[in-house]
Image (cartoon, rainbow, N blue to C red):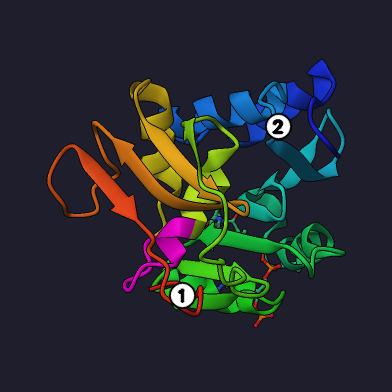
Amino acid sequence: MLAPLSPTWTQALRRLLRHKGELWQWQIGECLSQTHPGLESHFYLVGSPEQLWANVCVSLSGQVGILGHVYVDPSRRGQGLARALLQQAVEGRDQQRLYLGCRPELEPLYAQVGFTRLSSGFMRRGQQPPPLSPHSRIERQSLTWRHWPLLVEWGAGQSEPKCLEGPVLTMLRTDPQAWVEVADGQVVNWSAAQGPGLGGASPESGRLTHNSKGTRS
Ligand SMILES: CC(C)(COP(=O)(O)OP(=O)(O)OC[C@H]1O[C@@H](n2cnc3c(N)ncnc32)[C@H](O)[C@@H]1OP(=O)(O)O)[C@@H](O)C(=O)NCCC(=O)NCCS
């Protein structure tokens, strides 16, 4: 289903995911509202509004997405529900680049539906981002929700890939001055007063440079 869901489905989903922390509750609410231009959220659900058993969510900015909130009700675990729902969630998405953060022990589950490991608990499905041309036009934009998956992809492209899914949410919520520079649908540079804890100084920033072949360096 594509958000916004009806109020009854929304309530059921929020009940199913009520164990999530406050930051994630906020993110789920924002994605359910479907009010953020350029970000599209799809919820894959098993059950009914009266009894919801499982969820997987995909949030997409163009061809780049985050897959998350994989959850199966404890009473229905071990029956292949997560795998079946994941298969549905990735169907028809071979041209897209999907990222996810997970507990390392669950990497084999996601590998079954085509994800490969970038670093411990951080995986991608789909091709690497295409090389950027040195001639690509770079546009600076204020940080908004549609940059969330793009910044996760930026984190994936670092020499030590790091899942920035949560840290970018904190940037979105707390830093109205944060900005990104985007070229060909990829973040090439960003800056935030309170960065996502990449180990650098604060304020933090990141840069993706281009070499003569136009590949990432
Ligand atoms: C993880 C979770 C989604 C699995 O759901 P499920 O419906 O029981 O999973 P499935 O029955 O589809 O199992 C598919 C595969 O994943 C494996 N798997 C399931 N749970 C696992 C776990 N906790 N640790 C390691 N592997 C696990 C299964 O062994 C199975 O592998 P196999 O085909 O080689 O036997 C479910 O336990 C859950 O909701 N847990 C709490 C939330 C969570 O951890 N979500 C994932 C966040 S990254």
Give left or right: position of 149 versus 114: left
Report if residue 161 lies within the magenta region: yes
Q: Which residue is mark 1?
A: 118
In terms of sequence position, does the residue under pointer 2 or pointer 1 come before the other?
2
Q: Position of residue 42 (x, y in %)?
A: 77, 42
Q: Which mark is residue 13?
A: 2
Q: Position of residue 143 (x, y in %)?
A: 46, 31
Image point (32%, 72%), residue name: 160
Report if residue 191 lies within the magenta region: no
Which residue type does callout 2 highlight?
Leu
Quarter occupied by the N terminus: top right
Quarter occupied by the C terminus: bottom left
Q: How many marks?
A: 2
Mark 1 lies on a secondary structure that is: strand
Which residues, given as a range, are shown in magenta? 154-162
Mark 2 lies on a secondary structure that is: helix
Q: Are marks 2 and 1 in contact (CB under 8 Å)?
A: no
Which residue type does callout 1 highlight?
Leu
Front position in the image: 51 or 143: 143
Ligand 1 found in image quarter: bottom right
Give left or right: position of 182 versus 217: right
Q: Position of residue 37 (x, y in %)?
A: 69, 27
Give left or right: position of 79 versus 116: right
Q: Main secondary structure of the magenta part?
A: loop
Few, some or many C-alpha atoms within 10 Å of disc 2 (few <14, some 14-19, many ≥20)?
Answer: many
Few, some or many C-alpha atoms within 10 Å of disc 1 (few <14, some 14-19, many ≥20)?
Answer: some
